[in-house]
Image (cartoon, rainbow, N blue to C red):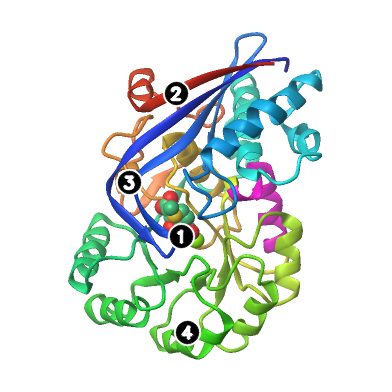
Amino acid sequence: MKLHGVELMHVSMPLVSPFRTSFGTQTTRDLLVLRVVAADGTEGWGECVTMADPVYSSEYVEGAADVLRRYLVPALAAGGDVDASRVATTLSRFKGHRMAKGALEMGVLDAELRVEGRSFARELGAVHDTVPCGVSVGIMDSIPALLDAVGGYLDEGYVRIKLKIEPGWDVDPVREVRERFGDDVLLQVDANTAYTLADARHLARLDPFDLLLIEQPLEEEDILGHADLARLIRTPVCLDESIVSAQSAAAAIRLGACQVVNIKPGRVGGYLESRRIHDVCVANGVPVWCGGMLETGIGRAANVALAALPGFTMPGDTSASDRYYRTDITEPFVLDHGTLPVPTGPGIGVLPDPDRLAEVTTRREWIPA
Ligand SMILES: CSCC[C@@H](NC(=O)CCC(=O)O)C(=O)O
Ligand SMILES: [Mg+2]
């Protein structure tokens, strides 16, 4: 398709409650929504999941807007006809910026599929019509507050609980959740790189609680450290921040650094690379699940389609819209007996509500092709 231009919308969405992780507390989600416009007027939607500050990864909202404006959109426009399967190659001369690249590829792919009348689910190879949903629970001010939150999510029907942990908030909350809700609840933890290999003996104290996994205990570049840790604890190690491509997934698996992989389309440069990572993991017998970046309904729709691929055998952080937002910018995703429906419409299968999008848009910028 011929590119006419890309509109960047800086979106700021208040969270229904503060979300605390080992790297900070969020009360608002600032992100970029992309409207990719083809010369024939076709539109495609993408979501850039960078955070406001470079604290989850090196990317951040203003940086993503800058690299899209100065490098990525011009490069795509200069390449003549744009084809979603070629976006990553066209942009490969620019290093990193995977969330910005992934958002642009997503918008191009959405536009293409809307014209073809094909859904993301069909394009990616989904085999399910619904996906089971887990939920991510932040670090809380107290154990009672945590138990209330977990109990509420279980009552809503979530099939898996993920607890954020950090030094000083790990073994006790896990033990208390186990004692209150029993051994049958699917339970996992996410450290967001908060520990070092020196904490191995301490992390082994989580072994008796039969966790599904411990997510990204060490810093993202410490692949060998995760391989060493995996030999020192029984809880399966899952990588998130460390896995940025199919190549890095293959290396981590070969080195024994992970037994499970969290696939986040933004972190790895898009949904097409996500499918490649899925294929590498399936070929190696490594289960995957779909991670989350507090996406609006735009990214959530695409994530649910991805989570319906055959290798996604563990519940992901594909929660309902109201886990984070009082009002989503698309029709809300509503949990139904612990599952979300896979969108079947063309492209991502959803559209933002123009009025709602306008309400939460703080800045718009048109980048002409
Ligand atoms: C602001 S924290 C974003 C990254 C975090 N994401 C979640 O915990 C799930 C968020 C979601 O439900 O979208 C992770 O490291 O997995
Ligand atoms: Mg994580």
Quadrant housing residue 247: bottom right
Task: Give yes or no for contact between labels 3 and 4 (Cβ–Cβ under 8 Å).
Answer: no
Please state the extent of the stretch shown in magenta in the rendering. Answer: 267-282
The residue shown at (80%, 33%) is 90
Question: Tag 3: Cα neighbours inside 10 Å, few (<14), some, or many (≥20)?
Answer: many
Taken as a whole, is the magenta stretch helix, strand or loop?
helix
Question: Tag 4: Cα neighbours inside 10 Å, few (<14), some, or many (≥20)?
Answer: many
Amino acid type at image mark 1:
Pro
Task: Give yes or no for contact between labels 1 and 4 (Cβ–Cβ under 8 Å).
Answer: no
Find ligand 1 in the image and state its quadrant. bottom left
Q: Secondary structure at mark 2?
A: strand
Amino acid type at image mark 3:
Tyr
In this picture, residue 4 sits left or right of residue 21: right
Q: Secondary structure at mark 1?
A: loop
Quadrant placement of the N terminus: top right
Q: Is residue 31 above or below residue 191?
A: above
Q: Which residue in the protein does label 2 denote? A: 363
Q: Which residue in the protein does label 3 denote? A: 324
Amino acid type at image mark 2:
Arg
Of callouts 1 and 3, the N-terminal one: 1
**Please, which residue is most extreme toward the top here?**
40
Q: Which residue in the protein does label 4 denote? A: 203
